[in-house]
Image (spheres, helix red, strand yellow):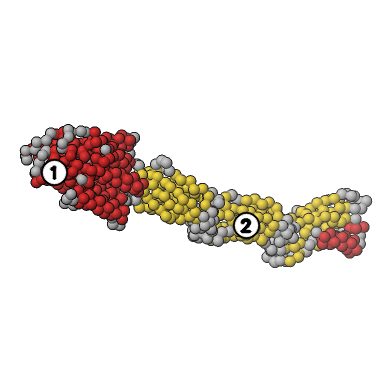
Amino acid sequence: MKKVMILLVLSIALTCGIVGTSTASQVGVIDVSLDPEVFFPHDTGTVTIVIKNTGTDSVELSRVNLQGTRSIYVIESPHYIGVGRLGAGDTMTTSFTIRAGNEEGIFYPRFSLNFVPSGNMMFPISLKVDKTPIEAGIKTRPDTFMEGKKDVVVVSVGNPRENSLSGVTITPQTGIANTVPTSIFIGTLQPGEKKEAEFSVTPTGTGDITFNVEYRNGQNRQTVPLTIPVVPGTAKRVPEPIVSNVEVTSIAGGYRITGDVSNAGLETARSVVMTTKDPAEPIDPFRVYVVGALDADDFSSFEVTFTAKDAETVPLVTRYRDDDGNLYEEVTHVTIQSGPMPVAEQDGISPMVIGIIGLSVVIVAGALLYSRKKR
Amino acid sequence: MALKIITALFRPEEFFGELSKEEAAFAVPFGIVIIYSILSAVAGYQMAALMAPMYDVALEGYGGVIAIFGAIGGFVGGIMVWIVAAVLFYLVSMAFHGEGSMKKVLEAVGYGMAPLIAAAGIGIAYLAMVADQVVAPVIRDIMDTTVAEEAVEAFMNQPVMADFTLLQTFLSVVFMIWAANIWYYGIRHARKLKARDAGITVIIPVVLYLIIVIASYGVF
């Protein structure tokens, strides 16, 4: 902008010097504005120029024109031929539609005025074309996505350009994940400014997620796609409840399973609940056993009661949630007896039984011998 | 009373020789029978209480009733042993022209049941010790006799119950032999029998009983 102002002052001075007429000397360009301020290659924009008659007499203008350069094309001009008179102290605003070419750099399309009966004025306009795009990247993403598990993806956008960018919007596009929100509007990014957008991504399959960063430079829409592959796998940091030390015993009306549930993962398993499911039917008193939160490397005992008819194994269900509230279910198949009760191995006769029998035999034999002793 | 019982246990010939000179008195023998019956009732209650959970589904809420019936059965069974043994001895001894009264036989049989108190007491104490290890399978349909039989079989075949059954069988055999020894002298004096006849009178029912006990354990 500063350069534009300097050029504007120089232009007024030059114009007066070159033309050297009283008519030209009293008319000058007092403001030039560009939209956008800095063009991308192939951007379309406008140049708005304000001229003023600073003299005491009116001036008659025959032509108002903007001359393009080798990389700046004037695509729409008012063609002010025979514009008319510009009264003393009056101003006139004129706009031209231009389009940048493929090249980067600073270009000077020339604005000119023709006066009646003679004389003219030229004014070079500084116009910058810069193809530096918005800086967009994935700031945060999980090491491994898990199918059905909600993870956070953070997209970061920054504006390295000299002009502000407006209407910045980030929209995820995918057919293999649920993303929330479906779009985030960031708004205007001033030069050197950075903003972030956080998305919750819950994969439902394997594929790609593309985050389209859309923004406007003036009236020109630009898009930067950011694509990340989604290959659901086993995450490294998850709760991992493991059931062990399982014992099945018969109780009145059914069975009881007791055991330990340990968290062998690296994250806390929350709302851990133990129960059984079909073909088992939970019964009181422990239809469901609520273990609660289980920290990594922690364990808890549990007890569930159920009935099961014509079943040799029953599914022991461990339900838990991760920190995001995602519900998981692990099933451990527990064998119950095929008959009505467990068949225990007979380890031989109890020593106590042998002792009692032996002692009884000795006592009774002694009593019999004593009773039959001749007296 | 205690002296009489001890004498009957360890010197039955001397004891019943003296007793034969007196009229039949039931106080002590009946006391022995009652104690034995009470212990049998306790044993019956114990066993029924352990098995009651098997019927919790099919006969919900009747566990207590089953246990009480077990106790009544045990008590009545104790009395029946006394009466049945006496009647059998009396009848068999009739073949040898026994002369004594039924009262004297009942008295002698009552004294002879004293060793059975020890057998019952040991059984109760052992079962009380191992009761918490006993697992009762559940019978869901009591009308399904096959399942019910399997459940009872499984209940009796679990190690702790198998040990108990073995102990109970041995105790029954060993202490019944002791009781038979006392009955031999008791019947001999009560019915005024020869030694051989008294032996046969006692041995026949006792051996039959022992065969039944051993057979029920599954030896034959």
Residue under the point 32% across and 45% down: B125
* Tag nearer the camera, 2 or 1: 1
- When asked about the image quadrant of residue A220, the answer is bottom right
Residue A326: percent from the left, percent from the top? 52, 50
Circle 1 — which element? helix
Quadrant of the rendered structure where residue B20 is? Answer: top left
Labels 2 and 1 share a subunit: no
Q: Is residue A137 left or right of residue A129?
A: left
Work out whether A23 lies above or below A107. above
> Residue A26, how many percent across, how many down?
90, 55
Real-space Cα separation, disc 2 to disc 1, in angstroms: 102 Å
Q: Chain of mark 1?
A: B
Q: Quadrant of the N terminus of chain A?
A: bottom right
- Label 2's element? strand
Q: Residue at x 26, y 54 (%)?
A: A358
Q: Residue A139: image x %, image y %?
A: 62, 59
Q: Residues within 10 Å of mark 1 (few under 14, many from 20)?
A: many
What residue is pinned by disc 1?
B202
Q: Nearer the viewer, residue A308 or A238?
A: A308
| Residue shown at 59% from the left, 53% from the top | A199
Instruction: Name which residue type carries label 1.
Output: Val
Q: At 48% from the left edge and 51% from the top edge, which residue is drawn? A: A300
Question: On the image, which quarter does residue A2 sit in?
Answer: bottom right
Regarding residue A105, the answer to whether it shows in the image is: yes
Mark 2 = which residue?
A: A155
Residue A328 visible at all: no
Left or right of A83, for residue A244: left
